[in-house]
Amino acid sequence: YGLSLNVANGVASGLFAVEEDADGGKGGAILLYNNNGVIEGRVGSVVYFTVAADAATGVVTLTQATLDGATPISIWHPNAANADDVVSLTGNGGAYQLNLTQTVTDGDGDTDTAVVNLAANNGGGNALNFADDGPDAQLAVLPGGFVHPALSVDETAGNQADPEDTVADRVSSANFSGYFVTGAANVAFGADGAGSVTYGLSLNVANGVASG
């Protein structure tokens, strides 16, 4: 068994690197190279993944490269609304085939081959896939003695004793981020690397609900 491309090295795979500063995180195109029967996905000299076949058994192994033996070199996923969306090697609109070839040899040296394109849907879905790794926002484990923030406003002008009216008359403010895991070293951004942390308020029902 062996792997090959049906086109010259450097064909665009249809996948892209993650670039944190780029619009939507979409970085450079990942190009395919046949390195002595191992298909590599690269951006420049950086290998993002490899596809290899066991010559004796036909077992194919897809390996996503890592920076340090643990952190994967991330591949861009376009669906920001889905933290587990999948991108696949699908031939990039017919630009290439990633072929697994079986070679059969008889006793006197005659050979024949059969080929399956692993970058095509052969009836069971895509063969070579990369699932996204999204961030994980978490509530903090509150330490003993944690002071829960509270906001109060006093309708009496000039009454601004803490925590009432801490900003000005009838304006009170406090930091509630302590309820969450914070800090670049602690937030679980996932394999795609650090982006940003923001906060926002919402209601869980339609506008116009009675406040009570």
Image (cartoon, helix red, strand yellow):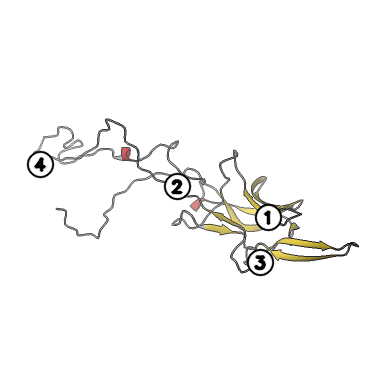
Residue 155 image label? 4
- Front-most of residues 76 and 143: 143
> Dot 4 lies on which element?
loop
Q: Is residue 107 left or right of residue 196?
A: right
C-alpha distance separating marks 4 and 1? 72 Å
Q: Are marks 3 and 4 in contact (CB under 8 Å)?
A: no
Q: Which residue is mark 1?
A: 60
Q: Residue 58 appears at what percent x and percent y?
A: 72, 57
Q: Amino acid at mark 2?
A: Pro
C-alpha distance separating marks 1 and 3? 22 Å
Please name the residue shown 15% across and 39% down the image: 169
Q: Earlier in the sequence, mark 1 or mark 3?
A: 1
Q: Earlier in the sequence, mark 3 or mark 4?
A: 3
Q: Residue 71 appears at what percent x and percent y?
A: 56, 42
Q: Residues within 10 Å of mark 4 (few under 14, many from 20)?
A: few
Q: Earlier in the sequence, mark 3 or mark 2?
A: 3
Please name which of the two marks, 3 or 2, marks the residue nearer to the observer: 2
28 w.r.t. 105: above or below: above
Q: Is residue 56 left or right of residue 140?
A: right
> Dot 3 lies on which element?
loop
Q: Which residue is mark 3?
A: 94
Q: Earlier in the sequence, mark 1 or mark 2?
A: 1
Please name which of the two marks, 3 or 4, marks the residue nearer to the observer: 3
104 w.r.t. 65: above or below: below
Q: Are marks 1 and 2 in contact (CB under 8 Å)?
A: no
Q: Amino acid at mark 1?
A: Val
> Dot 1 lies on which element?
strand
